[in-house]
Image (cartoon, rainbow, N blue to C red):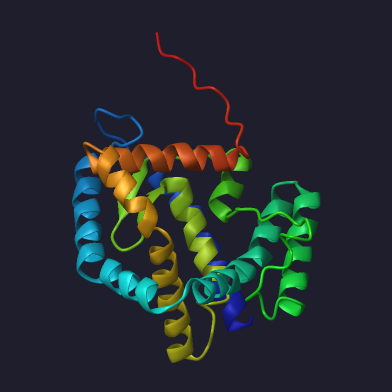
Amino acid sequence: MDKKVAKRFGMFALATALLAGLSGCASTANNPKDPLEGFNRAMFSFNDGLDKAIIKPVAQGYDYVLPQPVQTGVGNFFGNIADVFIAVNNLLQGKPADAASDAGRFLLNTTIGVLGVFDVATPAGLEKHDEDFGQTFGRWGVGEGAYVVWPFIGSRTVRDTAGYVVDVAVDPVWNVDHVPTRNSLAVLRLVDTRASLLPAEKVIDDAALDKYTYMRDAYLQRRKSLVYDGNPPREKLED
């Protein structure tokens, strides 16, 4: 078996194990979706400290030095890579029309858009979608499980953790054989993504009395909306 195929199969098996094992964890907490709140708050503080000490300053420097058109081009480049697996996930979710649109975006932006640096697909009427394997598991009926904050990775549910394992396994960036190139691309993508979030940070800081709770609830609501393409079912009210 090819080493890359074996690696991806192993990662998928790990994701399946995560779904089977972690989804069963339970304890008492104020929020039933967050039974690991003590652990999660500790990890949230760790990640927040790491962000303030290293990631945010680098992102601010990136935002200051690079003109907006260059930043847009970088974001478009990585977004174009993502369109391949967005198409795969749409297909796995039973949405062939969206999958075809995503494939069309990739082909158009890779060729006319110069490897995706320029987004010519959106003006052409091919809508940008946002799908991943966590959402695909959700569409297949897998329960979201407990909310977990992982060190470095951040907020996930058990289901999204399993999806993340698969996302990484098939991510072209993480599968680049040349290690310095792979690491440089991964860091560039991280910094570009963090820089794009800078404008929203003040809004969060101003709105949140408890930043942890605010971020947790926002994450869970957004993921539920994404799984159901913006039309989530109403939750049953408890008696």
Q: Quadrant of the N terminus?
A: bottom right
Place residue 62 in its image quadrant: bottom left
| Residue 214: percent from left, percent from top | 31, 39
Residue for point 68% across, 66% down: 84
Residue 171 visible within the image: no
Q: Nearer the viewer, residue 110 or 133?
A: 110
* Residue 207 placement, left or right of 112: left
Residue for point 44% across, 65% down: 193
| Residue 100: percent from left, percent from top | 80, 58
Residue for point 75% across, 56% down: 99
Looking at the image, the residue that sits furthest to the top is: 239
* Residue 103 placement, left or right of 143: right
Indicate whether 28 appears above or below 175: above
| Residue 138: percent from left, percent from top | 57, 42
Q: Nearer the viewer, residue 58 or 153?
A: 58
Q: Nearer the viewer, residue 16 or 194?
A: 194
Indicate whether 158 appears above or below 103: above
Indicate whether 70 appears above or below 26: below
